[in-house]
Amino acid sequence: MNFSKPRIKKHCCLWLTFKNDEALEHAIKHFAIKYDTPLFKPHISISKEHGFLTEWEFKSLDGIARSFEPFEIETETLLTGHTYFQSHYFSIKQSEKLDLIVSKINSILGLTYATLFPHISLIYGQLNIDPKSELNPLLKESFKLTVDAIQIMEIVNEISHWRPLKTILI
C-alpha cells in the first residue's frame, strides 16, 4: 500500500539536523532509489506548518542555538506508521536536551510540545515494504546522532524543491 502524497501549501518548517548522519543519509538514498520514493535530508521535524518567520523569531532561534552545545540523540526502533511522512521511521529515546531545545523553540513559535512526535523518517510514502530486512548492512537498529543545527526549511508540494532558508549551528 502506498500513501498518496498530501497536497502541501508553501510554508516553513523547523528541523533539527545532524553532523554525523552519513550512514542514515546513505540508507535514505538507498531506499529512495530502490523503491522510487522521495529523497530527503535526515532530520527531526520540530514544527510542521509554520508561517514564514519574523526577524524577532530568527534572532530568538539564534539565541537558543547559542545556548546549546551539540548533543547526542539515540534511535530506538524502526517502526511503520500510517501517514505519508511517517511510513517508516525510527523512534527516538527520550532526551533531556532534546526536550529542552524543543520546548524553548516551541515557546518562541507559540507551539505546544504535544505537537512534536520526535522521530527520524527513513522512507516517505511506501508502506508495503519491510526495510528491516535490508537495514543491517546499512544501519544498526539503534544508533546515535549528534544534533548540531536548527534548520529553517521552505516546504513546497514537491519534496525535491524543499530548500533550507537558514541553518543555525548549535
Image (cartoon, rainbow, N blue to C red):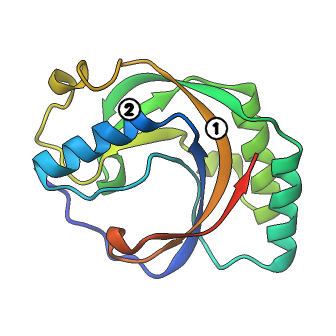
Image-based side of 163 in relation to 141, left or right? right
Q: Residue, x 53% and y 34% (percent of image)?
A: 20
* Residue 84, image quadrant: bottom left
Q: Residue at x 27, y 26 (%)?
A: 138
Please name the amino acid that badge 1 sits on.
Val
Query: Closest to the observer: 42 or 52?
Result: 42
**CA–CA distance in space, label 1 to label 2:** 15 Å
Please tell me in which quadrant of the rendered image residue 36 appears.
Answer: bottom left
SS label for mark 1: strand
Q: Could you tell whether 24 is left or right of 168 in the image?
A: left
Residue 32, placed above or below residue 130:
below
State if disc 2 and disc 1 touch (CB < 8 Å).
Answer: no
Tell me the quarter of the picture where residue 79 sits: top left
- Quadrant the C terminus occupies: top right
Residue 160 shows which numbered tag?
none
Identify the residue at horizontal 83%, vertical 59% (top origin): 62
- Label drawn at residue 147: 1
- Please provide percent x and percent y for residue 29: 27, 46
Q: Position of residue 106 (x, y in %)?
A: 75, 55
Q: Is residue 21 left or right of residue 114?
A: left
Mark closer to the chain start, 1 or 2: 2
Residue 88 at least partly seen: no
The picture places residue 7, in percent across and down from the top left corner, at 33, 76
- Specify whether residue 18 is in view: yes
User: Label 2 is placed on what type of residue?
Assistant: Ala
Residue 23 - label: 2
Q: Please report the residue visible at 87 percent of the width from the left and 74 percent of the height from the top.
A: 56
Crowding at dot 2, Cα within 10 Å, few <14 / some 14-19 / many 20+, comes out as few
Q: Nearer the viewer, mark 1 or mark 2?
A: 2
| Label 1, residues with CA under 10 Å away: few <14, some 14-19, many ≥20 | many
Total tally of numbered discs in the picture? 2
